[in-house]
Amino acid sequence: MTELAAHCVNISKIIDDLRQRIQNNNFNADSNLTLTQYRASQRFSYIDNETISYVSHIAYNDPGQTTTNYSGLTEITFYLNDIPKLLPIDFISSQITDVIVNGYNVGDVSNGEFLLIPRVYLNIGYNNIAVNYVSTFNNDGEGCMFYSDSTVAPPQNYTYTHFEPWSAHRFIPCFDQPDLKATASFNVILPTEWNAVGNTGYSYMGAYNEADYIAKVPSQNEDLLVGKYLVNKSGNFYVFNKT
């Protein structure tokens, strides 16, 4: 039994090494990937358009006061009809800390504009990808902005998003093309003196504590959610659901 266990461990190490080699080769070969119309149509052919969902956890830690960034964890679920060599997910962020694909931490697979998911981690059928990140507020009118209105006393601070024509991926990782429809929910943690509004209205608002958050916002990646994203969070949290 001991010898068999040792062989199993060696095989596991070989498989992990093979995954890493394939990942590195695929990433380097396509590191200049851009989303052309042809590549967008290819991506549309791989993904079942009725199955995409985004669950995003966004935390603004005293925006505009002690920090200039926000943290996020986005979980993407979708069904693949076929597996491409690389699956690009549109995303621009200042820091990507974890990319978990169907339970595997695949490391840094960003080329600065996309997360390039190697096929070895993907399944024909349902897939789940979780991305943990920290992003800086934008100041060019696209993605997620911070604005302080100093014409009133005391000054009023705002954060807001603007996604058109192609800027949703500057806020969350997503398939940012109009023919790939999805359902989405946003779960926002804010300082207590802030309020959150959305075009659907929130389905829940309450004082943040970890147990209530997990109960209201179930996750397929709870270890990542609890172990990293929710660490040192405080304030109120809001749940927004949109189809």
Image (tube, rainbow, N blue to C red):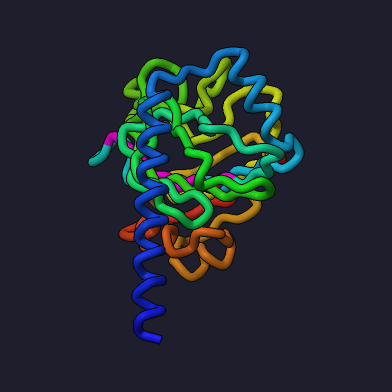
User: How many badges with numbers are in the image?
Assistant: 0
Residue name at image x 40 percent, y 40 percent: 23
Residue name at image x 44 percent, y 66 percent: 210
**Residue 191 rendering spot, x and y as whole percentages:** 38, 49
In the displayed structure, 26 sits above or below 228; it is above
User: Residue extending furthest left?
Assistant: 66
Q: Nearer the viewer, residue 167 or 13?
A: 13
Q: Is residue 123 left or right of residue 153?
A: right
The quadrant of the rendering that contains the N terminus is bottom left
In the displayed structure, 95 sits above or below 56; it is above
Q: Nearer the viewer, residue 55 or 235?
A: 55
Q: Is residue 61 magenta?
A: no
User: Residue extending furthest bottom?
Assistant: 1
**Residue 173 rendering spot, x and y as whole percentages:** 49, 35
User: Which of the 4 image quadrants contains residue 13?
Assistant: bottom left
Q: Is residue 161 left or right of residue 38?
A: left
- Predominant secondary structure, magenta span: strand
Q: Is residue 234 visible?
A: no
Q: Is residue 18 visible?
A: yes
User: Residue extending furthest right?
Assistant: 50
User: Residue extending furthest front?
Assistant: 3
Residue name at image x 65 percent, y 52 percent: 203
In the displayed structure, 75 sits above or below 30; it is below
Residue name at image x 35 percent, y 51 percent: 17
The quadrant of the rendering that contains the C terminus is top right
Q: Is residue 58 left or right of residue 67?
A: right
**Residue 94 rendering spot, x and y as whole percentages:** 31, 32
Q: Which residues are magenta?
A: 68-76
Q: Is residue 74 magenta?
A: yes
**Residue 24 rendering spot, x and y as whole percentages:** 35, 37
User: Which of the 4 image quadrants contains residue 31?
Assistant: top left
Q: Nearer the viewer, residue 177 or 7?
A: 7
